Image: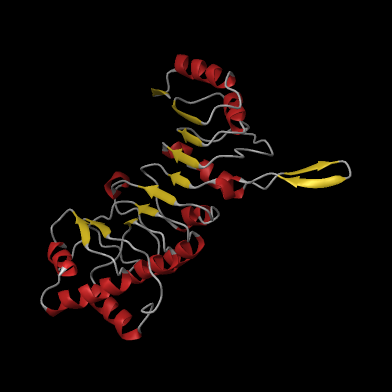
Amino acid sequence: MCGWGEEEPLKDATSSFVHQRGSLLRRFRSCVPLSEAAIHHLMQLPNLRSLIFAQGPPRTIPPSIFTSLERLRLHELAALPWLHLLASHKEFILQNGSAPATSHVNIRKTLRYISCPLDTTIDSTFLSSILKFRNLVALRLGTYCYRVGGCAFHLTDDNMEKLAASLHRLKSLQLKQPCGSNSRNTTVASLISISIHCPDLTDLETHFNTLTIVGDIQRLIDGGYGRNSAKCELRRLVVGYIPLKVHGEDIETIVVGFKVIFPCLTDFTDFNGHWRELGSKLRD
C-alpha cells in the first residue's frame, strides 16, 4: 500500500514494485496510478485475492484476468469502469490441440466483496453490471447523497427485486446511507424482497419512501405478501435521515408491518430521532 495522489515518482516506484511481485502476492492497494504494464502484471497474478484501485482499466485486456480475485474496492470514480469491464469480460477457454478445452474461472464467479466509489450513482446502468456477480456476499456504497448534489439512489421496487433475487448470497448490502429526500422510487416492498431472497443478510442500508408508508404496509398486511416465507435475521435497519412523520394507530400499523418484513428486527440506526418510538415498540 502506498501513497495518496498522483505523484509521478510514486507512480514509477510503485509500478516497478508491482513488476517484482510474483505468485505469492495476495493483497494489493495503491492510490497511486500504475503503468499499464504494471496493471497487466497484477491481472495475471494467480493468487491475488484483494485489490483496491484508484484508476480506470488499461486500453488492452488479456484474455484471462484476476483468476482468484475475491475482494475489489474501487476507490475513485475514475475506477468505476472496472465494474462494467469485469462484468462483461468473457470466460477464457484454452484450446490445447486435440485436448478438451479448459475453462478458466471467471471473476464473476470468484468475487465475494465489491466496494464502489463514494460518488457512485445507483441506477439501472449500475445495476446491470452488479447483477453479473452472482456470488457476492457484500456490496457496499457507504456515503452521503449530498456528495453528488442530491439523492443518488434511482432504483425502483422492481430493480430491488431483481437485485435481491440475483444476489441471494448477500450478507451485507449498503446502497448509500439513506438521505432525507424521501425517494419515491422504492417502498417497503423492496425491503420484503430483500428479506425473502437474501436469508443470510445481517447488514442493510437502502432508501425507501415513507410518505406513503402506512398505506404501503397496510396493503402488504392485507395481501398477506410474504407472510409465510422464510426471511432474513436482520436485527438493525439503517434508516439514516429518512423522515418518519406518523402518529397514533399508524405507528402500530408500521410496527406490525416491520415485524412481518424483518421478524428479528429490534432497532433502527436513526440520525434524526424520528424512528426511536418505533424502535421501542418493536422491542416491547
Indicate the quadrant where residue 158 lies: bottom left
Q: Is residue 181 above or below residue 42?
A: below
Q: In the image, 128: left or right of 267?
A: right
Quadrant where the image shows the N terminus: top left
Q: In the image, 172: left or right of 87?
A: left
Residue at the image point whose x is 49% and y is 31% from the top? 27
Residue at the image point whose x is 59% and y is 20% from the top? 19
Residue at the image point whose x is 56% and y is 23% from the top? 35
Find residue 112 and report its horizontal and vertical position in percent.
Answer: 49, 47
Of residue 199 and residue 7, the one placed in the foreground of this image is 199
Which residue of the protein is positioned furthest toward the left in this rendering?
248
Residue at the image point whose x is 13% and y is 79% from the top? 249
Q: How many marks?
A: 0
Figure colour scheme? secondary structure
Which residue of the protein is positioned furthest toward the bottom in this rendering?
222
Indicate the quadrant where residue 155 lies: bottom left
Find residue 144 and report its horizontal and vertical position in percent.
Answer: 28, 47
Find residue 86 and report its horizontal and vertical position in percent.
Answer: 57, 45
